[in-house]
Image (cartoon, grey):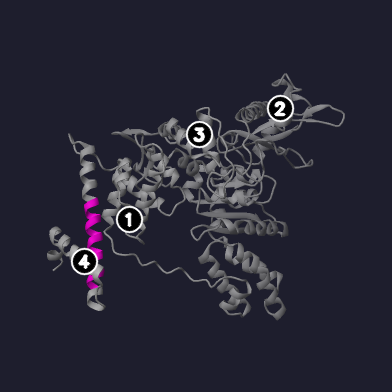
């Protein structure tokens, strides 16, 4: 786990304006900064960054968070990767604590020293520049790209280069060709006889770039008919095929504009689609789609469409993607599949039929639920008793893996219709608990303005949490739970926490959304000119505490009144009731109720 003390220290060293401005240019707007929101389309700026509170908030789409949250949402980084990216900016080494069970700070693997990572990415960046310059000198390579219909603009966007023929061309830019780091970066190979030579020779070179715009590897495409057609970098300390997607940084704008990611199988598919105006495509890197790929995409879009060939290999790849998507799905996220004619891949399809035809296939993509039922029905004949039994048996592990409850309910109903079993029988055979949409919880009536008001004051003056009588908060009220969660986070800290740290402590909690909403509204409120803001907050706080006290008295008075009418009161209850009558009369509550 990443220690919370480190996260707090990191956020205090980072200026969120410096983090966001290079990616989304900001303009001064009073005491804050503003821009058009990078997370949804808009004509006028509603995206606001507060340097004093160190958070951003969009009044259009509700995007909200700290510098950590911005890198996660904008660049699609995981929580740990966002922490590491910010730590690199200020020269901090991310410490580790032993795992204590799941949590957003868990490391998936031991962190690599920043110096080692930087050394490798620097070497790869130098190689990418060398290949890019070599492309300009090769008529053969330029002719190949033109024949594929690629413009110079697209070649520059993806940093396409050329590795010339020869065995040790990289020695031109790396005089110390014996450096073991060149082998660690996957640029140089040592054979059994100890001879060193360039991994990539006479190939179109396509840099693989991570979401921090660092070159982490290459895909090399042969110009002629040689084998292998594509040669990828090996896995290295900075490149894991199962975690990276080609074209993700270049697709960032397209992903935001469409809220859809198109996953294809090849580099040239992504590049050809971009050439024809389809800017939201990415590709897996010579490996099957993994759960990590899907999680990374779902951090940026609501819909993922897999576009594979319509042959047996393409359908096998699609089924593997479906299996890995099930435990990442929610009822707000969707997965669909496009199967192109056997004679086409996305590259040839968009070149022959154009952007509109390709986008129409994406719009009409087969939903995950349809593909799942179709695939299972093809494997087990639903027209026979044996086939129907096999179909349900094959569906069982998939349904157990699926975490989206409403989608699972729909699939159970589809299976029941297909097999002739009842819905309850499918649930029993698949060992599912009875599936029903949860009924909305009944919440005691409570003025929302009071609870939200308490949150507002605590966000502005956290030290007041010490004076909050937590026992007066009404149980069962979601807004009261948010007040309680916020107060507990404040009280657990040894020193007052800034808002950016508070919101990170609440990340993933059910109360986070309400607290973010209230914090966003505070950006729109300016203190009255010449007013003592601290004194005003203290006065408002006392008013809220008085209201809490009155509400508790009112609730207890009603309870005892009802019991007196129905069953009578014992001696202690009568004494308490008499005290409440005096107190309620003093506060004017009884007369007002009458």
Q: Is residue 126 above or below residue 317?
A: above
Q: Is residue 354 above or below residue 223?
A: below
Q: Is residue 584 left or right of residue 310?
A: left
The magenta stretch is: 545-562
Q: Is residue 33 visible?
A: yes
Front disc: 2 or 3: 3
Q: Secondary structure at mark 4?
A: helix
The reply to whether the magenta stretch includes residue 593 is: no
Q: Secondary structure at mark 1?
A: helix
Give me the C-alpha separation between circle 2 and circle 4: 83 Å
Give me the C-alpha separation between circle 2 and circle 1: 61 Å
Sequence order check: which comes first, mark 2 or mark 4?
A: 2
Give me the C-alpha separation between circle 4 and circle 3: 61 Å
The secondary structure that dominates the magenta segment is helix
Sequence order check: which comes first, mark 2 or mark 1?
A: 2
Front disc: 3 or 1: 1
Q: Is residue 102 left or right of residue 147?
A: left
Give me the C-alpha separation between circle 3 and circle 1: 39 Å
Residue at which label 2 appears: 181
Disc 1 crowd rating (10 Å Cα; few below 14, some 14-19, many 20+) is: few
Sequence order check: which comes first, mark 4 or mark 3?
A: 3
Residue 519 marker: none
Disc 3 crowd rating (10 Å Cα; few below 14, some 14-19, many 20+) is: many
Q: Position of residue 143 (x, y in %)?
A: 68, 34
Residue 471 marker: 1
Give me the C-alpha separation between circle 2 and circle 3: 25 Å
Residue at which label 3 appears: 86
Sequence order check: which comes first, mark 3 or mark 1?
A: 3
Q: Answer whether labels 2 and 3 touch (C-beta < 8 Å).
A: no
Residue at which label 4 appears: 575
Q: Residue at x 60, y 30 (%)?
A: 114
């Amino acid at each position: 786990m990443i220690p919370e003390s480190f996260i707090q220290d990191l956020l205090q060293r980072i200026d969120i304006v410096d983090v966001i401005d290079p990616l989304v240019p900001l303009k001064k707007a009073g005491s804050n900064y503003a821009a058009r929101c990078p997370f949804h389309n808009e004509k006028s700026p509603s995206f606001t960054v507060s340097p004093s509170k160190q958070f951003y908030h969009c009044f259009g789409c509700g995007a909200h968070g700290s510098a950590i949250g911005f890198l996660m949402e904008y660049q699609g980084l995981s929580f740990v990767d966002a922490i590491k990216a910010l730590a690199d900016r200020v020269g901090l080494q991310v410490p580790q604590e032993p795992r204590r069970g799941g949590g957003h700070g868990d490391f998936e693997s031991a962190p690599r020293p920043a110096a080692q990572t930087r050394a490798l990415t620097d070497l790869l960046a130098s190689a990418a520049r060398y290949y890019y310059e070599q492309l300009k000198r090769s008529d053969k390579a330029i002719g190949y790209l033109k024949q594929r219909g690629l413009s110079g603009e697209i070649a520059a966007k993806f940093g396409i280069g050329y590795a010339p023929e020869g065995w040790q061309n990289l020695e031109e830019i790396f005089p110390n060709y014996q450096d073991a780091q060149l082998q660690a970066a996957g640029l140089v190979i040592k054979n059994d006889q100890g001879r060193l030579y360039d991994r990539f020779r006479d190939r179109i070179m396509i840099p693989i770039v991570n979401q921090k715009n660092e070159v982490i590897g290459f895909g090399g495409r042969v110009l002629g008919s040689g084998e292998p057609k594509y040669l990828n970098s090996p896995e290295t300390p900075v490149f894991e095929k199962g975690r990276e997607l080609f074209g993700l940084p270049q697709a960032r704008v397209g992903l935001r504009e469409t809220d859809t990611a198109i996953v294809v199988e090849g580099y040239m598919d992504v590049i050809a689609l971009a050439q024809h105006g389809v800017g939201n495509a990415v590709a897996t890197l010579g490996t099957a789609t993994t759960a990590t790929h899907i999680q990374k995409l779902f951090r940026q879009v609501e819909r993922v469409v897999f576009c594979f060939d319509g042959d047996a290999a393409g359908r096998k790849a699609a089924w593997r993607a479906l299996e890995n998507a099930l435990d990442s799905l929610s009822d707000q996220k969707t997965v669909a599949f496009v199967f192109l004619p056997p004679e086409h891949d996305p590259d040839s399809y968009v070149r022959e039929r154009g952007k509109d035809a390709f986008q129409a296939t994406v719009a009409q993509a087969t939903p995950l639920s349809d593909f799942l039922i179709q695939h299972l029905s093809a494997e087990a004949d639903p027209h026979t008793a044996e086939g129907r039994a096999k179909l349900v048996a094959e569906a069982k592990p998939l349904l157990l893996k699926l975490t989206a409850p409403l989608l699972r309910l729909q699939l159970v109903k589809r299976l029941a219709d297909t097999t002739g079993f009842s819905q309850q029988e499918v649930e029993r055979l698949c060992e599912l608990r009875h599936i029903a949409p949860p009924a909305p919880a009944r919440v005691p009536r409570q003025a929302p303005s009071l609870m939200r008001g308490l949150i507002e004051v605590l966000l502005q003056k956290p030290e007041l949490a010490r004076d909050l009588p937590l026992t007066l908060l009404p149980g069962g009220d979601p807004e009261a739970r948010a007040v309680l969660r916020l107060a507990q986070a404040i009280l657990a800290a040894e020193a007052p926490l800034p808002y950016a740290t508070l919101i990170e402590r609440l990340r993933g909690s059910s109360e986070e959304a309400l607290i973010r909403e209230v914090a966003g509204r505070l950006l729109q409120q300016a203190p009255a000119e010449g007013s003592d803001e601290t004194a005003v907050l203290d006065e408002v706080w006392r008013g809220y505490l008085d209201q809490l006290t009155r509400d508790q008295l009112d609730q207890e008075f009603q309870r005892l009144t009802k019991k007196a009418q129905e069953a009578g009161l014992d001696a202690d209850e009568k004494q308490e009731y008499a005290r409440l009558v005096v107190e309620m009369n003093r506060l004017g509550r009884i007369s007002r109720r009458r």
